[in-house]
Image (cartoon, grey):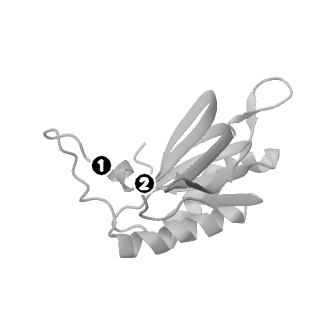
């Protein structure tokens, strides 16, 4: 399971012109589910994302997490995080889990994240979405449940 976590002051996602999810100060998480991922991967990444110390403390050091800040989260499913573009020009998505396997694990991640953060909203799984956000810092962290990076 892979995630891109961004520190945001605001984020929203729209489907067919209608806003379906939003977050204020907190994190925007793009989540890709790989073949072979389990609920354990989802729980690990949810805790990691919520507890990442990417918010500044009183001294200006990044020592606080979204959970410490009482932050919210917006989670967007994004199978393209599993793209393999090492060969040719067309990325391969063969490492991405099939939608019927990915959706329950995506939902598991969202529920696990809710255990750490008060407010967690989402896009719509498999929908064409338009995501808008303000990345503060900018701060962008890549996470992988298999610790590949």
Q: Which residue is mark 2?
A: 78
Tell me which numbered mark, 1 or 2, is placed earlier along the sequence.
2
Alpha-carbon neighbours of circle 2 within 10 Å: few (<14), some, or many (≥20)? some
Q: Which residue is mark 1?
A: 83
Give x and y (percent) for residue 84.
Answer: 25, 47
In this view, the residue farthest toward the right is 58
Q: Residue at x 69, y 39 (%)?
A: 53
**Is 129 situated above or below 111?**
above
In this view, the residue farthest toward the top is 59
In this view, the residue farthest toward the front is 17
Q: Residue at x 56, y 49 (%)?
A: 29
Q: Residue at x 53, y 64 (%)?
A: 42
Quarter of the rendering containing residue 56: top right
Residue 20, label in figure: none
- Closer to the camera in the image, 114 or 76: 76
Say left or right for 6 vs 115. Answer: left
Look at the numbered disc 1 and give the secondary structure of its residue: loop
Look at the numbered disc 2 and give the secondary structure of its residue: loop
- Disc 1 and disc 2: Cα gap in Å? 10 Å
Residue 7 visible in image = yes
**Is 91 situated above or below 116?**
above
- Closer to the camera in the image, 128 or 86: 128
Look at the numbered discs 1 and 2 and tell me whether their residues touch, using CB distance below 8 Å.
Answer: no
């Amino acid at each position: 399971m892979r995630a891109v976590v961004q520190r945001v002051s605001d984020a929203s996602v729209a489907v067919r012109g209608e806003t379906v999810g939003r977050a204020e100060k907190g994190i925007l998480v793009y989540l890709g589910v790989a073949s072979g991922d389990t609920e354990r991967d989802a729980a690990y990444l949810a805790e990691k994302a919520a507890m990442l110390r990417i918010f500044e403390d009183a001294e200006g050091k990044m020592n606080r997490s979204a959970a410490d800040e009482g932050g919210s989260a917006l989670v967007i499913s994004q199978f393209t995080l599993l793209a393999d573009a090492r060969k040719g020009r067309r990325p391969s998505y063969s490492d991405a889990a099939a939608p019927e396997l990915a959706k329950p694990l995506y939902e598991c991640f969202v529920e696990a994240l809710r255990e750490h953060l008060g407010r967690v909203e989402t896009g719509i799984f498999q929908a064409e979405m338009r995501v808008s956000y303000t990345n503060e810092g900018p701060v962008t962290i890549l996470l992988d449940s298999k610790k590949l990076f």
